[in-house]
Amino acid sequence: MTEIRILLVDDHPVVRAGLRAMLSDFEGFIVVAEAPEGGAAVREVQRLQTLGEPLDVVLMDLQMGAGMDGVTATKAIKALPSAPPVLILTTYDTDADILAAVEAGASGYMLKDAPPEQIRAAVQSAAAGQTALAPEVAARLLGRIRNPEPVLSAREVQLLELLATGMSNKAMSKQLFISEATVKTHLVHIYDKLGVDNRTAAISVASQRRIIRTGA
């Protein structure tokens, strides 16, 4: 069986140890390196490439304390020559997280509470250049496509995330490199789609519908 060389990226040593133990039980799976945050993961991918020992899959967490987050790290890794597939493995399943990961170039998105066999199959799919989505994640993406109700665009979801941090219109415009007028237009569309008329209600509804995560 062809070996699958894996880099584990998670800020919790106990989680990395558990994943290493689980993956080591699968024939052909080899955890060749670990990283506690995104920046270290990018450097590890580059180091292994320089040594002529490229990876087959990077198994990446999303939220990693004060270090580089998984989405930023995924973008950086996918910008490298001959970049390995990045498979997200996280506890978060909001629209904002899923869309950000997909846009960053992730090959798949799995949840940490998935059965070991699902994670094994996802790693194999990613290594083979295929897409791997947790059933719950696939259902949310399909729901966005099939739902007759107005669906928030990726930009609108991004604005909602910033809104939840308490940013002003001016601050959001600077963060996203758009005008304040454009921010206001997006907010009008967001309020209309969510059936609300103010920021607090928009954040509350978006959190309830798992469009964004708050308090994390």
Image (cartoon, rainbow, N blue to C red):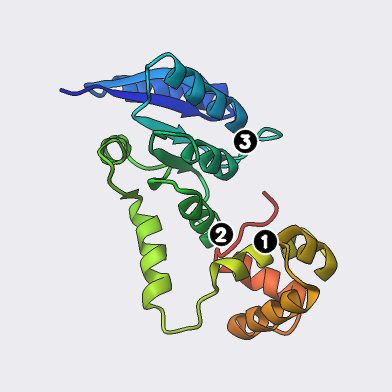
Q: Quadrant of residue 204?
A: bottom right
Task: Name the residue rendered at 38%, 47% in the picture.
Answer: 108
Query: In the rendered image, which residue does mark 1 sit on?
Result: 161
Give the percent coordinates (x, y) of residue 101.
50, 50
Give the percent coordinates (x, y) of residue 179.
77, 72
Q: Quadrant of residue 168?
A: bottom right
Say above or below: 201 vs 90. Answer: below
Query: In the rendered image, which residue does mark 3 sit on?
Result: 64
Amino acid at pointer 3: Met
Amino acid at pointer 1: Glu
Q: Earlier in the sequence, mark 2 or mark 3?
A: 3
Say above or below: 193 vs 165. Answer: below
Q: Quadrant of the N terminus?
A: top left
Say above or below: 203 vs 215. Answer: below
Label 3 crowd (10 A; few <14 / some 14-19 / many >=20)? some
- Total count of labels: 3
